[in-house]
Image: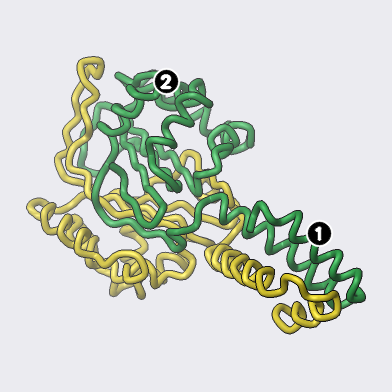
Amino acid sequence: MGNTIGRMTGLTLLTPIRRQWVWMLRLGFFAGRFFPMAQNAILQFDFIHYVRWAIVDGLPGERLRYRYLLFESNFDGPWQHYIDAFAYVVPRWIRLTWGRGPAFPGPPPAEPLKAWIAMNSLDGGHYYCAYPHASTRMVKGAVEVRERFQRLVEDSARLGPEAFAAAYERFLVESQARL
Amino acid sequence: MSERRNHVGVVYSLTVVAPIAPGREQAAREAIEALPVAAASPLARLEGLHFSRLHVVSELVFQGPRQRHRDHLRASQLVFTSTFDGELDPYLEALRTRAGPDVWWRHCAGYPGSADAASFVRFVREHQIDSSLFASAHPDVTVAGVKASLALRERIVDFAASAHGLDAADLQRRFRETFA
């Protein structure tokens, strides 16, 4: 299956696109760049750090009869959970993206999709992550805490002890889910 | 326009697919598999690099009878992807001078080596495939920002444990000594 390091998994797929649907996929990706709703469909899952799609129109020296969709996702946790979430929460979105390829098993259920991904996953190689033990949720939470903490540091200089203690308690209560 | 497609927030997505020279596929695979991993990876020398992957594709997966035509690759392809902070040219310069990319790309047809910056950049750009869509859960955070935030989070947790039960004046004093 995809490469792993720490709690991260890198999943890469390279799958053919039926010729008549290439334009539609391009249109969908174009729209996805400008309408956050489209990206939110996939980023609503709190385990994806980065995800990319690239339409491969051709390769030097190759005579390919299809265009190909290169997909790469970097996420935390086992890929089976990742696919379950996609198959049951955003099946229409998944069908719109990969349903333009031959033999794509439109979810749900998730099991045929898992088999299809296992068949198409590009394995092996070398995988690197700068923070392999930090889940997406940890990263987002830590960034939010850091921003809020700056205000507390400023408060520590301007408030009296009692007022600061109250601000500190408030900070801990409001941040505890992210700590 | 195409450059913009590779960006989201402060991050750039680079995808490079280059053909491996005839007879060099196994050597390319071995070179990639032999790279040290995690903090010892040569890619760890690139401070702004979030994720990267290197692998060899020898066959395009046939999807079964519903795929009317079957494509075969004449040459195996070396796929290199990177997700990094900032712009492409500074990243390529860091990659060229610090990560030793000859280890993997020297097996590719037409690779000029990393000694000459212009030739190296030309090779990468010639084999670059633009992202059609690139998205991130934390697009505006650099690697340094991620690491600093995670480290601060740990310090806050440690402080909260050690400061439990202090009166208001001691709490503020300890807090300022630790963080201000």
Q: Amino acid at mark 2?
A: Pro
Find residue B92 and report its image quarter: bottom left
Residue A95 on image: x %, y %: 45, 21
In this rendering, the label closer to the viewer, 1 or 2: 1
Report the residue at 34% width, 21% height from top. Answer: A104
Camera-side residue of B137 and A145: A145
Identify the chain drawn in green.
A
Find residue A170 and report its image quarter: bottom right
Residue under label 2, please give it: A107
Which hue belongs to chain B? yellow
Say left or right for A93 vs A79. right
Q: Regarding mark 1 in the picture, which secondary structure is present there?
A: helix
Residue A131 on image: x %, y %: 46, 61
Residue A125 on image: x %, y %: 25, 53
Q: Disc 1 versus disc 2: distance between alpha carbons?
A: 44 Å
Q: Crowdedness of circle 2 by 10 Å Cα count: few (<14), some, many (20+)?
A: many
Question: Is A122 rendered above or below residue B15?
Answer: above
Say left or right for A161 vs B85. right
Residue B174 on image: x %, y %: 75, 81
Q: Quadrant of the N terminus of chain B?
A: top right
Report the residue at 21% width, 20% height from top. Answer: B64
Residue under label 1, please give it: A170
Q: Amino acid at mark 1?
A: Arg
